[in-house]
Image (tube, helix red, strand yellow):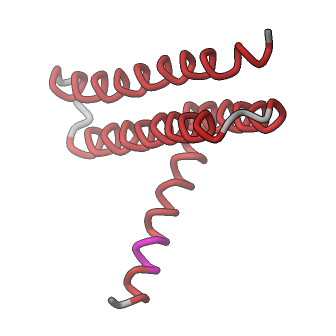
Amino acid sequence: MDWRKERKRFACAWAGIVAAVREETHMRIHIALAVIALVVAAILHISKLEWLILLLTIGSVITLELINTAIERAVDLVTTDSHPLAKAAKDIAAGAVLIAAVVAVVVGIIIFLPYLL
C-alpha cells in the first residue's frame, strides 16, 4: 500500500467535508444539532447502546447531507437549465436527507425523553 497516495485520498475526502461545512447551511445546522445531542448525551450519561445508536444516526444524517451536496453539485455541473430530471435528482437526494433527519429526531426523543421525565 502506498501511504502517500492514501494520505492524499484522505486529504481530498477531508477537503470535501470542509467545503460542505463552509458552503452548505444545512450541513452546519446538522453539525450544530449533532453537537448539542452529543453534549446532552454526555450530560445524561446515556448507555453504551444508546451512544451507538445516536452516533450511527448522526453519521447517517451527515453522510446523506454530504451525498445530497455532491448530487446537487454534479447536477449543477451538467446543466444550468431547469430540467425535470435534474430537479428530480436534487429533490430525491434532499428527500433522503429529510427522512434521515426526521428519523434522527425520533431516535433523539426515544433516547432522551426517559432521562428527562
Q: Which residues are magenta?
A: 7-11
Which residue does the image show at 80% across and 30% down from the upper left? Answer: 44
Main SS, magenta residues: helix
**Image height of 23 relative to 100, above or below:** below
Q: Quadrant of the C terminus?
A: top right
Farthest residue to the right: give it. Answer: 43
Q: x and y percent of residue 54 in the render? A: 58, 34
Is 3 situated left or right of 34 in this image? left
* Residue in the foreground of this view, choosing between 44 and 69: 44
Is 73 situated left or right of 83 in this image? right
Q: x and y percent of residue 104 in the render? A: 53, 24
Residue 8 lies within the magenta run = yes
**Image height of 84 relative to 58, above or below:** above
* Residue in the foreground of this view, choosing between 3 and 42: 42
Which residue does the image show at 37% across and 36% down from the upper left? Answer: 68
Residue 94 lies within the magenta run = no
Which residue does the image show at 44% across and 68% down from the upper left? Answer: 12
Please identify the quarter of the rendering in which residue 106 is found.
Answer: top right
Q: Quadrant of the N terminus?
A: bottom left
Q: x and y percent of residue 32 in the render? A: 69, 35
Farthest residue to the top: give it. Answer: 117
Q: How many marks?
A: 0
Which residue does the image show at 26% across and 35% down from the upper left? Answer: 80
**Image height of 94 relative to 3, above or below:** above
Q: x and y percent of residue 50 in the render? A: 61, 33
Is 75 situated left or right of 73 in this image? left
